[in-house]
Image: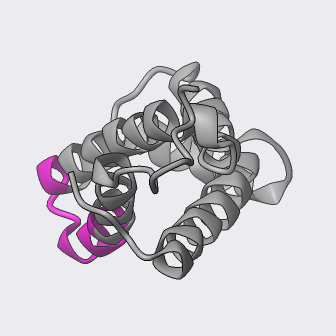
Amino acid sequence: MIRLPRAAMWACVIVLAVIFVLVGASKLEGPGALRWAERFAQWGYPAATRPVVGVLEILGGLGVLIPRVRRPAAATLLAVMVGALGTHAMQAEFPRLIPPLVLGGLACLLYSSRPRPGCDPRT
């Protein structure tokens, strides 16, 4: 495990929270949801996959803000990004590999960071 400076940890948390809540919400509602539905269908996923991924992204994005559930939330976001990497690689959408690599890297960094002494969320 690594120990991130507090500012770096919070920057990572805020970036992940904002991006995943916004992208997750776009998968559930509004004009973006129609585009996401088309993409998921093109990739060969069942229709129910899109809202499940959207909910996982929103819950993970909100979860990283809560110290007690930060690690499981980061692990959830990392798993979603591994799925995105696999999807884009299998579809030969190589430019689309960059966002899940960056976001997955941030989620991995957050997952592997140690809490500061006296700030253990398990207590």
Which quadrant: the C terminus? top right
Q: Position of residue 77 (x, y in %)?
A: 44, 43
**Horizontal side of residue 9 vs 112, given as left or right:** right
Determine the residue positioned at 58% across, 19% down: 48
Q: Nearer the viewer, residue 36 or 69?
A: 69
Determine the residue positioned at 25% across, 44% down: 82
- Please name the predominant secondary structure of the magenta segment in the image: helix
Determine the residue positioned at 23% across, 52% down: 85
Residue furthest front as drawn: 118
Q: Is residue 10 above or below residue 81?
A: below
**Horizontal side of residue 57 vs 40, given as left or right:** right
Q: Position of residue 88 (x, y in %)?
A: 24, 55
Q: Is residue 97 magenta?
A: yes
Q: Nearer the viewer, residue 70 or 82?
A: 70
Q: Position of residue 22 (x, y in %)?
A: 72, 60
Residue 74 position by quadrant: top left
Residue 98 position by quadrant: bottom left
Determine the residue positioned at 61% across, 55% down: 20
Q: Position of residue 49 (x, y in %)?
A: 51, 25
Magenta range: 89-101
